[in-house]
Image (cartoon, helix red, strand yellow):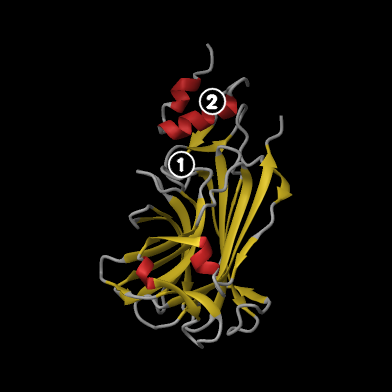
Amino acid sequence: MAPDLEGFLSGFDKSRRDFLRKIVAGAAFVPPVMASFSLDGPSIAEVEAGIVANQCFPNQTLTPLFFDFSGNDYTDNFRDILRGGDINAGFDLATLTRPSLNFTGSAGSAGSTWLTVLNGETFVDLCQICVSAEVLSHPFNNNKGAGVVALFNEGTGQKGLALLLMNAGNTDVLQLVTVDPAGKLSLLKSVALGSGIHEDVWYHLTLEVTGLATPTVTVTGKVFQHSVPSNPNSPLGAQVGTTLSLAGLLPTGVSHFGEVGLVGRAVSASIATSLTNFTVTPVEGTIPP
């Protein structure tokens, strides 16, 4: 009996079916062994033939993009999606000395999302992408934080991946979520940080997505202290908590390409969070024959 490619693909939404069909076109297809991963939707746990997970080989690191939000960094390069009136370039909210992008304002018990994206940059044909930023939380009140966004698209039903560093007293957390253009967040995975995130201190946050030229990806999120806590340009110190990691197909609505940006989130809190040194490192790659 011929392998049932279309039967296997029927478990995916249309955008995924089209992508997977391109990957296996012209190759002998054997349906992979299926399992449930932490990323939603059917996921490939083991591949027998036809599709090889995360075998995208980097061949060129493109010039990283860097923004410390001095001068016209923000006004010339970013486009606000959510709560733009509460996103402003200036100086950090702790010392008022370092150029930063500041998220201000408050949210009720239903929560609210702040979002701005790098204008005119939709990264395609990549093997991997890494986005990072320095994050500082100013007030001590309930649940608020900020982070970075990758693979964001703005059409109906589309989403992006976001890594959030949330300051919540003794229940700080590193969260990987999906975010849609309306600001709705869906949790994919979290790592408890206890009371590891302090106010008016800079932390280095990094989100990396690898395997983008293949059906399955690996998503990694980390947060680090700085050797000089008040200086976001100082060398990195110890990692806070453990590494957040997921592997599998991207969640429904998230594509293998898209925009990057910065995001804030607050629930029953004033956000008052600063970000600087936003860095985007795209890597082109190829799939072996």
Query: At 63% across and 75% down in the image, what residue appears?
Result: 238
Q: Is disc 1 surrounded by few (<14), some (14 to 19) or many (20+) residues within 10 Å?
A: few
Give residue 96's position: percent from left, percent from top: 50, 87
Give residue 80's position: percent from left, percent from top: 41, 61
Residue with the mark numbered 1? 36
In the rendered image, the residue lying farthest to the top is 1
Give residue 146's position: percent from left, percent from top: 45, 69
As shown in the figure, which amino acid type bears the numbered disc 1?
Answer: Ser
Q: Is residue 24 above or below residue 55?
A: above
Q: Is disc 2 surrounded by few (<14), some (14 to 19) or many (20+) residues within 10 Å?
A: some
Tell me the number on the disc at residue 31.
2
Query: At 59% across and 83% down in the image, what residue appears?
Result: 229
As shown in the figure, which amino acid type bears the numbered disc 2?
Answer: Pro
Q: CA distance from mark 2 to mark 1?
A: 15 Å
In the rendered image, the residue lying farthest to the bottom is 95
Q: Secondary structure at mark 2?
A: loop
Give residue 258's position: percent from left, percent from top: 51, 48
The tag earlier along the polypeptide, 2 or 1, is 2
Q: Please state which of residues 33 and 53 is positioned toward the viewer in this rendering.
A: 53
Number of numbered discs overlaid on the protein picture: 2
In the rendered image, the residue lying farthest to the right is 59
Query: At 53% across and 48% down in the image, what residue appears?
Result: 122
Q: Are marks 2 and 1 in contact (CB under 8 Å)?
A: no
Q: Quadrant of the C terminus?
A: top right
Say which quarter of the image contains residue 220: bottom right
Q: Please state which of residues 230 and 66 is positioned toward the viewer in this rendering.
A: 66
Query: At 47% across and 29% down in the image, what residue appears?
Result: 17
Say which quarter of the image contains residue 231: bottom right
